[in-house]
Amino acid sequence: MHILIVDDHAFVCEGLKTTLIDTLDDIQVTTTERGEEVLSILSQNEIDLIILDLFMPGGYGGFGLIGLLHERHPCLPIIVLSASENSVHIRKCLDLGVTGFVTKSAPKESLFEAISKALDGERYVPKYLIEAL
């Protein structure tokens, strides 16, 4: 399995990469801090899942990037990992086709559940966020 992590904070990318490698078997992780590199990475690698920060600087971030990715790679699962718990943001992400939404304050088990569900073709949103929606 090959996961692409997209987050504008290098610390988050490296910490998440280490957590994924330490927890999951047979995994390859690519990271980028720049949204504009995502399409290039996708053209050069077979990516099974993207974990994407919602709010990234520049024109290649946020909802626009999610929409572009879903348009060009409609079968590629995308999990948004965000500090936002705003129901409007969550709903918009789901409407744009993301497979999962996990807050950065959630326990790591939430992310692993989201990954598992996404790879099985299911959507994931934590119960407490569903209630907020």
Image (cartoon, rainbow, N blue to C red):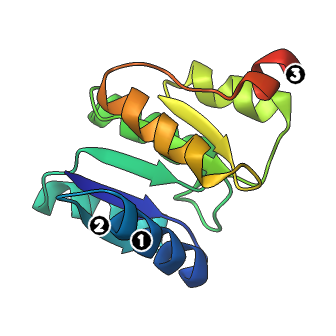
Q: Which residue is mark 3?
A: 132
Give the distance between the C-alpha atoms of the residues marked 2 and 1, in whole angstroms: 6 Å
Sequence-wise, the earlier of marks 2 and 3 is: 2
Give the distance between the C-alpha atoms of the residues marked 2 and 3, in whole angstroms: 32 Å
* Residue beneath the point at 52% across and 58% down: 60
Q: Are marks 2 and 1 in contact (CB under 8 Å)?
A: yes
Residue 124 image point, x, y percent: 55, 26
Sequence-wise, the earlier of marks 1 and 3 is: 1
Sequence-wise, the earlier of marks 2 and 1 is: 1
In the image, 110: left or right of 23? Answer: right
| Circle count | 3
Give the distance between the C-alpha atoms of the residues marked 1 and 3, in whole angstroms: 29 Å
Placement of the C terminus among the 4 image quadrants = top right
Residue 91 image point, x, y percent: 71, 23
Question: Label 1: few (<14), some or many (≥20) within 10 Å?
Answer: many
Q: Which residue is mark 1?
A: 17
